[in-house]
Amino acid sequence: MGKNVAVSGYYGFDNFGDDAILACIVDYLRSRGSNVAVISNNPKKTSALYQVFSVKNFNLLAVFALLANSDVLISGGGSLLQDVTSFKSLFYYSLVIKMALALKKKVIIFAQGIGPLQRPRSEKMVKEILSKASLITVRDEKSLERVKSWGLNATLVNDPVFSLDLPRHEQDSGIVGVQLRDCKTMNDLLLNQLADKIVSEFSDKKIEIYSFQKSIDLKICKIFEKMLKLRNPEIQTEVLHSLSQVDFMIKISKLDYMIAMRFHAVLVALKCGVKTLAINYDAKVMKLAYEALIPILTMNGDDDYDVAFEKMKALDSNKILAFANNKPFEWNLFEKFLV
């Protein structure tokens, strides 16, 4: 008989990457006969999408009851244990873990980025809860080094989305994908350079502009669409948003090229064998681009865009697929805690 497993993370916020991770977790747990319950910002939608029991994240009585009826808490993935977003966010995710520990439940830290931690009390809090976890898995070297510096054991794992079986890209669809998100380093120079190059290279193709999280991405995607239309009113464009993660993945699999900022936009394109150009808004995107041997633009807007686009065009789809398929997620680490 499977375990009752509670899952805590940045779920129910319509974020493509986190939703893809949740799909991986739910699929794995269901394949092992586990009963899955998810703590979500939008429990009604999460329940309908994943066919799981779900409770509201800030309904602490419901969260406590859920944990009381669970055998294991999975905390993650993503970067939950950090205080850059806010101390309130760190306090909340830590509180969920503390409740599970107080109820004597096993806690698994699932493919998380640990930190940054700007406050001494934040570091003390995270160190304390991690010391009581049954298993700590992290998604990057910095997190691994931080946890080990505290004298704790952790295992570096690949992103769970690498474990998804995605459709393979088929050549010559005539569609180019652009995935943008707003951030502190977003600037007009980058957008103008990118718009100039896309119009000069791909005016004969359809440009699909992907908003993966409506609250952060949609505005900048619509601005970029207007920039393309100002340069060439005849260029065919479409801003895609509010799709299911499955529909997003199917769309990405049909692209000739992908130019992307978000980590999971790059990852999914690689898993589909799509020739991809990354935009380095975050260190995790840069690391993935270097590992996959794909070109990458900085946020400065002063790169050689001609060279970057030529490198993207020259990529070998089979080599991209070989890289992505050689990054399995280490599900075996979790077996003894979940079965």
Image (cartoon, rainbow, N blue to C red):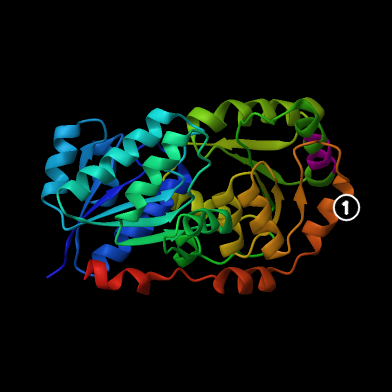
Task: Give the percent coordinates (x, y) of residue 23.
Answer: 36, 55
Of residues 139 and 214, the one nearer the viewer is 139
Secondary structure at badge 1 equals: helix
Residue drawn at x 55%, y 30% is 218
* Residue 36, magenta (yes or no): no
Of residues 322 and 39, the one nearer the viewer is 39
State whether residue 267 is above or below residue 114: below
Relative side of 224 to 297, left or right? left
State whether residue 134 is above or below residue 190: below
Task: Give the percent coordinates (x, y) of residue 59.
Answer: 20, 31
Q: Quadrant of the C terminus?
A: bottom left
The quadrant in which residue 322 appears is bottom right
Of residues 137 and 225, the one nearer the viewer is 137
Of residues 205 and 169, the one nearer the viewer is 169
Relative side of 303 to 98, left or right? right
* Residue 196, magenta (yes or no): yes
**Observer able to see residue 173:** no
Residue drawn at x 49%, y 50% is 113
State whether residue 42 is above or below residue 254: above
Task: Give the percent coordinates (x, y) of residue 100.
Answer: 21, 48
Amino acid carrying label 1: it is: Val
Residue drawn at x 35%, y 42% is 11
- Main SS type for the magenta part? helix
Task: Give the percent coordinates (x, y) of residue 156.
Answer: 49, 64
Magenta segment boundaries in residue numbering: 195-200
Instruction: Identify the residue position indicated by label 1 in the image.
Output: 307
